[in-house]
Amino acid sequence: MKRATAALGVTSREDGARRRRQRGAVAVAAMAAVLVGYDMGVISGALLFIKPEFRLSPLESGFVVTTLLAGAVLGAAVAGSVAQAIGRRTTLLITCLVYVVSSVLMAAAPGYGWLLVGRALAGVAVGSTQSTVPTYLAELAPADSRGRQSTGNQLMIATGILISAVVNYFFARDLSWRWSLGLAAVPAALIGLALLRQSETPRWLMLKGRVDDARRVLDSLLPAEQAQRTFIELDTARRADVDSNTGASLNWRSLLRSRALRRIVVIATIFSMAQQLLGINSIVYYAPTILAQVGFGTQAALINTIGFGVLSVVMTLLCGYVVDRTGRRPLLIAGGIVLGLAMLGVAAVFGFHLLGTFTGQSTALAMLSIFKAGYSLTWGPVVWIMLPELFPLRARSAGVSVATSAQILVTVALTLFFPDLIAHGATGIFVFFGLFGLAAAVFVAKLLPETTRQSLESLHSPEPRRPA
């Protein structure tokens, strides 16, 4: 009896150590998303001081923002093939190196042209991160906590945006904007070093036929019984692919040749694009400008942006708590409705000429706060949780890459034209965002499956298991 009890205690300690290693690997990969949020958010404050120094026109200011996004389209498009060929972890390592180089270039930029080069290179890293991190997290996380652990991606994006808002408030003035743009090099280097100690995902290893390596990774990250069960599922799926000659990983073009995969690609791409058509990045990039237009001073606008950042982090943490309990679909449907109504509220401030009044300021601040809170609880994290879940293993990297690239293309268009749209009358654009939020709720209700608490393999087997 004593021996059995002792053996049970040893097993329990070993299982605990495996869980800590698994959570550590997820945490390190998710940290890369801090750089996405930081590079997206820091420019909103830095632009206030870059514009007079480089004498930028409104169009040139828009290009400073959209150059990063144009680079991100390329990064997301390439990352799918790279991650499929050399692995998710190695792709993230290369991405961290690109972050370091781009940050140094932006900090040392002698003029507008070099600033754009640095921003474009940073964009490549941002796109690669957005395409690769969700896949890495989904492929490492157990089914019963995949939603919570995958929320780490959006949590770190929100944290990066919050950090950028704090940096903008304290440092993004005069020459200090160079420090704010160059600061990302430090965490990028540290995250890259930490990734060297992490393992590749067992699902990618299995895809490449490295069955023994996949088993070793599973045994090191999951409790023994769970590792055995997951390995059997992975190996069964691999053998089924081999038997049906569908085991080879797919590129963009191959996705469109299969009717079943083509439908998934279309739904996932619309789903991904919808996340941006709700209006979030327009709010992130231009929140200080919007608040200034409704009567807040520059410093007050930056302080309120910090408040939005704190709210976003808190609500993303809450999403991690509820997403595996409530399911993905209920959060998305409720979120679409709330976000749509919030944007219609902002439209009312502009439409009823309440700019500069106390009522207008209060309403705009309340609606933007509700929007940020609702987005961070629902569409922000849940889209990134679900995108890798929608695709089978052989199509996952390419599929997420397509959907992410399409999303960033939408963001490029919105961000490039948003300053002019809001300058010539903001009511219409906010009405569009509001109505689209309501339409997005209907889209989810009609077309998206529930993926909560199912293994990635069971989601794409002929008879998926019901959620546990």
Image (cartoon, rainbow, N blue to C red):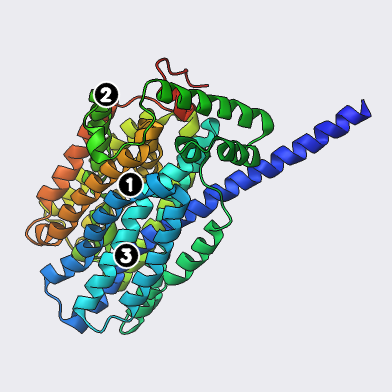
Quadrant of the frame with the N terminus: top right
Vertical placement of residue 319 versus 49, above or below: above
In the image, which disc is placed on residue 81?
Answer: 1
Q: Secondary structure at mark 3?
A: helix
Q: Are marks 2 and 1 in contact (CB under 8 Å)?
A: no
- Residue 407: give x, y in percent of width and height: 24, 46
- Residue 68: give x, y in percent of width and height: 25, 62
Residue 70 seen in this snapshot? yes
Q: Amino acid at mark 1?
A: Ser
Q: CA distance from mark 3 to mark 2?
A: 35 Å
Occupied quadrant, residue 245: top left
Q: Secondary structure at mark 1?
A: helix
Q: Residue at x 46, y 27 (%)?
A: 238
Q: Secondary structure at mark 2?
A: helix
Task: Report the residue marked by disc 3.
Answer: 122
Q: Amino acid at mark 2?
A: Ala
Residue 274 seen in this snapshot? no
Label located before the other in sequence (3 or 2): 3
Occupied quadrant, residue 126: bottom left
Vertical placement of residue 286 versus 53, above or below: above
Task: Report the residue marked by disc 2.
Answer: 260
Count of picture labels: 3
Q: Residue at x 44, y 46 (%)?
A: 316
Vertical placement of residue 298 versus 441, above or below: below
